[in-house]
């Protein structure tokens, strides 16, 4: 076989592989667009079980009582029931330095005064790919010691955000189970559920870590917490309709997997620095809300279901307007 023949066959195989990839991408796009069809029911909107992630400045001394008063003015007109205030992160050995949250006690006092019905959880986490090793028993013990200490500041609960947690990670399940002794309210951010078969191994091959969780592992985590917040953003979808379909797909999967007595929150991207230009245009609070409404319309009424806005310090007035008109007070 001469060189030209080898090159021609190689090019044909490459063209075939490219055609297959393009066909699969096209099928995925069509499937997501189909998820975003129809009109949501009028009743499919906030039930007053929404959440908001708050930045670190609320507990490190940069925010004052006056700031909490202003936050309360905004939140009183919303369905926000839970706030997750960034109070870490853990160190590489799992320790949580109290110097990271010197104003937590004051913040909780001000929140109790201004928003007594809103629950406040300490948002705690760390990167676990090269930083904190949750496989290490001593590190998990340090995490739990930090949780026990910070709960003395008056928080209502703990909200974990460790990334990336691989599908099937039993050490994370162990940590969730043992955190129960320190708090009555336990929630966690979770990555996206595998949207369609074979997407999880394909994404893992490209990223070298799990972007998606299997339905089985997602359920294992849900069984150990009171709330899950599905981070539907950073979807890599190139248009608003595809992102809306992606959010709807995630919400539909999660609604089937999270029992009614647990709280399910659909993460809504109230930030604008994705790092990829088309994502800033494609992903929005409005599209997340529309996807969440479509999924709820198909599923049927559910009380413990809401949007979780990420994040307060990046949210614009447009983001808040989209939340109010597309989710909170839909007509």
Image (tube, grey):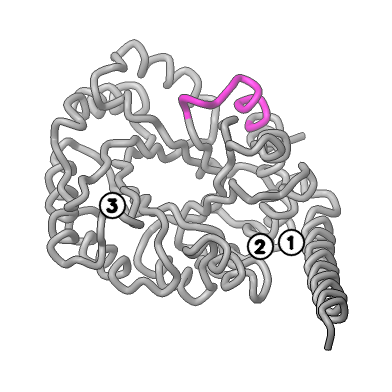
Tag 1 or tag 2, which sits nearer the N-term? 2
Numbered disc 3: secondary structure: loop
Q: Nearer the viewer, residue 67 or 131?
A: 131
Relative horizontal placement of residue 45, taking residue 192 as reference (left or right): right
Q: Which residue lies at the image location 29% right of the left edge and 48% below the top edge?
A: 158
| Residue 313 is inside the magenta segment | yes
Tag 3 or tag 1, which sits nearer the N-term? 3
Q: Nearer the viewer, residue 204 or 123?
A: 204
Do tag 1 and tag 3 residues touch (Cβ < 8 Å)?
A: no
The residue mark sitting in front, 1 or 3, is 3
Res. 149 image quadrant: top left
The residue mark sitting in front, 2 or 1, is 2
Residue 301 at x, y = what percent? 65, 57
Numbered disc 1: secondary structure: helix
Q: Residues within 10 Å of mark 2 (few under 14, many from 20)?
A: many
How far apart, in angstroms, are the residues tagged by discs 1 and 3? 41 Å
Q: Which residue is mark 1?
A: 298
How far apart, in angstroms, are the residues tagged by discs 2 and 1? 8 Å
Q: Residue furthest top?
A: 66
Q: Does 92 appear above or below 316?
A: below
Q: Which residue lies at the image location 66% right of the left edge and 44% below the top edge?
A: 288
Q: Which residues are magenta?
A: 312-323
How far apart, in angstroms, are the residues tagged by discs 2 and 3? 33 Å
Do tag 2 and tag 1 residues touch (Cβ < 8 Å)?
A: yes
Numbered disc 2: secondary structure: helix
Q: Which residue is mark 3?
A: 131
Question: What is the number of the mark on residue 252?
Answer: 2
Residue 328 at x, y = what percent? 63, 35
Q: Does 76 appear above or below 69?
A: below
């Amino acid at each position: 076989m001469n060189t030209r023949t080898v090159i021609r066959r190689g090019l044909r195989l490459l063209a075939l592989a490219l055609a297959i990839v393009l066909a699969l991408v096209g099928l995925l796009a069509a499937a997501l667009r189909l998820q975003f069809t129809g009109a949501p029911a009028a009743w499919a909107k906030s039930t007053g079980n929404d959440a908001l992630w708050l930045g670190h400045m609320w507990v490190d001394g940069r925010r004052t009582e006056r700031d909490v008063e202003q936050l309360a003015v905004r939140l009183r007109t919303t369905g926000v029931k839970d706030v997750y205030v960034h109070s870490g992160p853990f160190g590489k050995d799992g320790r949580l330095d109290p110097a990271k949250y010197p104003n937590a006690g004051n913040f909780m006092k001000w929140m109790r005064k201004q928003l007594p019905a809103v629950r406040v959880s300490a948002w705690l986490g760390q990167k676990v790919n090269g930083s904190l090793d949750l496989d290490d028993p001593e590190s998990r013990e340090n995490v739990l010691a930090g949780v026990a200490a910070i709960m003395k500041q008056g928080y209502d609960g703990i909200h974990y955000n460790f990334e990336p947690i691989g599908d099937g990670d039993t050490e994370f399940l162990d940590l969730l189970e043992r955190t129960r002794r320190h708090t009555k309210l336990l929630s966690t951010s979770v990555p996206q559920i595998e949207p369609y078969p074979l997407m999880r191994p394909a994404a893992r091959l490209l990223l070298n870590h799990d972007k998606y969780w299997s339905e089985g592992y997602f359920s294992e985590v849900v069984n150990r917490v009171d709330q899950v917040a599905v981070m539907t953003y950073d979807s890599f979808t190139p248009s608003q309709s595809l992102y809306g379909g992606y959010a709807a797909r995630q919400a539909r999967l999660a609604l089937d997997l999270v029992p009614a007595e647990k709280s399910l929150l659909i993460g809504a991207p109230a930030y604008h620095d994705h790092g990829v230009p088309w994502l800033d245009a494609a992903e929005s609070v409005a599209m997340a809300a529309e996807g969440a409404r479509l999924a709820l319309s198909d599923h049927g009424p559910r009380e413990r279901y809401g949007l979780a806005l990420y994040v307060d310090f990046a949210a614009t007035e447009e983001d808040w307007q989209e939340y109010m008109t597309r989710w909170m007070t839909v007509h």
